[in-house]
Image: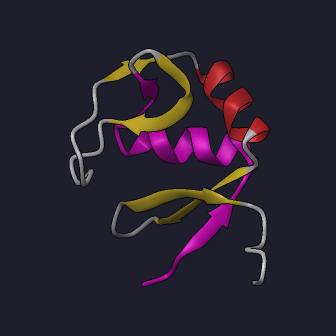
């Protein structure tokens, strides 16, 4: 399994759309972004589609990155920030 990390909007857009995924947020909570259309999502959330520009605006504001395996279709949204030590 080869896993990649990216913050590049163009890469994310092209990978997501090629996988049939779309920009979304949890209904009524525009700061909780997701990629809709994920058949392997652990929980069923009530998602509403949003525009890509709004999705990327929140993606950058929250300092997220896409971690994904292009061969398996697996992905997650993760923080770009290094975890703080205790």
Residue at 68% over, 31% down: 58
Residue at 30% over, 36% down: 37
**Occupied quadrant, residue 72:** bottom left
Residue at 50% over, 64% down: 68
Residue span colored magenta = 1-26
How is the structure coloured here?
secondary structure
Q: Is residue 30 left or right of residue 82?
A: left
Rendered location of residue 81, percent (x, y): 78, 64
Q: Is residue 54 left or right of residue 20?
A: right
In the rendered structure, does residue 12 fall within the stretch colored magenta? Answer: yes
> Does residue 11 lie above or below 27 as drawn?
below
Rendered location of residue 52, percent (x, y): 60, 23
> Does residue 56 lie above or below 16 as drawn?
above
> Does residue 79 lie above or below 84 as drawn?
above
In the rendered structure, does residue 9 fall within the stretch colored magenta? Answer: yes
Report the quarter where the N terminus lies. bottom left
Q: Is residue 80 left or right of residue 25?
A: right
**Occupied quadrant, residue 51:** top right
Rendered location of residue 21, percent (x, y): 39, 37
């Amino acid at each position: 399994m080869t896993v990649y990390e990216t913050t590049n909007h163009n890469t994310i857009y092209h990978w997501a759309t090629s996988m049939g995924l779309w920009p979304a947020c949890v209904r009524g909570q525009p700061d909780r972004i997701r990629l809709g259309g994920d058949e392997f999502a652990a929980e069923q959330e009530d998602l509403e589609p949003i525009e890509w520009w709004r999705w990327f605006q929140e993606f950058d504001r929250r300092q997220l990155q896409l971690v994904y395996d292009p061969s398996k279709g697996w992905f997650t949204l993760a923080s770009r920030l290094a975890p703080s030590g205790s």
